[in-house]
Image (tube, grey):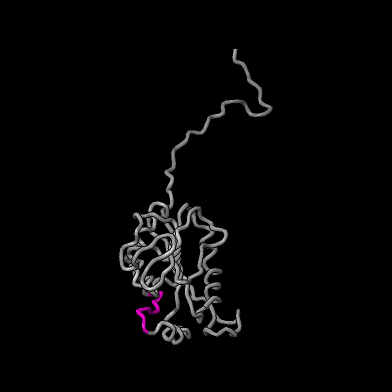
């Protein structure tokens, strides 16, 4: 699992580096997870999910609305968060600022990791979420899905060869999306007519003639 988390980080870090803003939210199912290093945005709020609750910088129930104002974050990073607790995707979109970036990772239900994932999460309400389903829901919520990328090894084996798995067979995925809003709309400049100065001088080598 640590190897999969590392592959996910490599996949989404170019997007995180290009993200503009000052506030970011990390929601992670990994106990020791933390913001990217260096923390490319100024202020990070880190929340970890365990047993249906949010812990870390804020303590709250995962079944309740997120305790943040609308549009509070320029970047939201969800690392396997939607697989453990019934977080509302609408709540995630609500606290993302217009034009803000959403990066979401998870286990692909159509991968060789599914049997292992079902065994590890037996007896709980956790389940793998389809990235295609999540992408469709985000589009209905006025969020632009920029890409969905499969990452990681084919099987969850500690001795599996690295760097030899085709991308579409990876056990995890990275979904990158952007909320529609002013920051994502290109500025259209209106052309303004300009009057070119008229040069009334003589051409080089010409002389004025006087008429008597």
Residue 23 lies in the magenta-colored region = no
**Which corner quadrant holds the C terminus?**
top right
| Residue at 34 percent of width and 61 percent of height | 66
Check the image and name the residue furthest to the top: 212
Left or right: 136, with 148 as reference point: left
Residue 84 in the image: x percent, y percent?
Answer: 39, 75
| Residue at 69 percent of width and 27 percent of height | 205
Residue 196 in the image: x percent, y percent?
Answer: 51, 33
- Which of the two residues, 2 or 152, is positioned nearer the viewer here? 2
Kindly indicate the quadrant of the structure image that contains residue 121: bottom left
- Which of the two residues, 42 or 194, is positioned nearer the viewer here? 42
From the image, give the main secondary structure of the stretch colored magenta: loop
Residue 129 in the image: x percent, y percent?
Answer: 39, 76
Kindly indicate the quadrant of the structure image that contains residue 193: top left
Residue 124 lies in the magenta-colored region = yes
Check the image and name the residue furthest to the left: 64
Check the image and name the residue furthest to the right: 205
- Specify start and end residues of the magenta stretch as a single range: 123-132
Compared with 161, 105 (above or below) is above
Residue 131 in the image: x percent, y percent?
Answer: 41, 74
Q: How many marks?
A: 0
| Residue at 50 percent of width and 82 percent of height | 169
């Amino acid at each position: 699992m640590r190897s999969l988390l590392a592959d996910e980080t490599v996949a989404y870090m170019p997007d995180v580096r290009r993200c503009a803003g000052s506030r970011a939210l990390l929601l992670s199912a990994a106990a020791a997870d933390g913001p990217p290093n260096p923390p490319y945005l100024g202020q990070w709020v880190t929340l970890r999910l365990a047993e249906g609750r949010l812990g870390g910088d804020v303590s709250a129930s995962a079944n309740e609305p997120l305790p943040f104002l609308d549009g509070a974050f320029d970047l939201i990073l969800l690392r396997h968060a939607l697989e453990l607790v019934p977080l509302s995707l609408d709540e995630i979109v609500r606290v993302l600022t217009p034009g803000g970036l959403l990066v979401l990772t998870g286990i692909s239900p159509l991968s060789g990791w599914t049997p292992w994932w079902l065994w590890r999460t037996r007896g709980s309400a956790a389940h793998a979420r389809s990235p295609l389903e999540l992408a469709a829901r985000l589009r209905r919520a006025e969020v632009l899905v920029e890409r969905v990328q499969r990452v990681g090894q084919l099987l969850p084996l500690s001795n599996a060869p690295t760097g030899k798995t085709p991308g579409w067979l990876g056990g995890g995925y990275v979904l990158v999306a952007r909320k529609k809003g002013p920051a994502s709309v290109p500025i259209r400049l209106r052309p303004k007519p300009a009057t070119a100065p008229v040069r009334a001088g003589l051409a080089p080598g010409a002389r004025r003639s006087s008429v008597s």
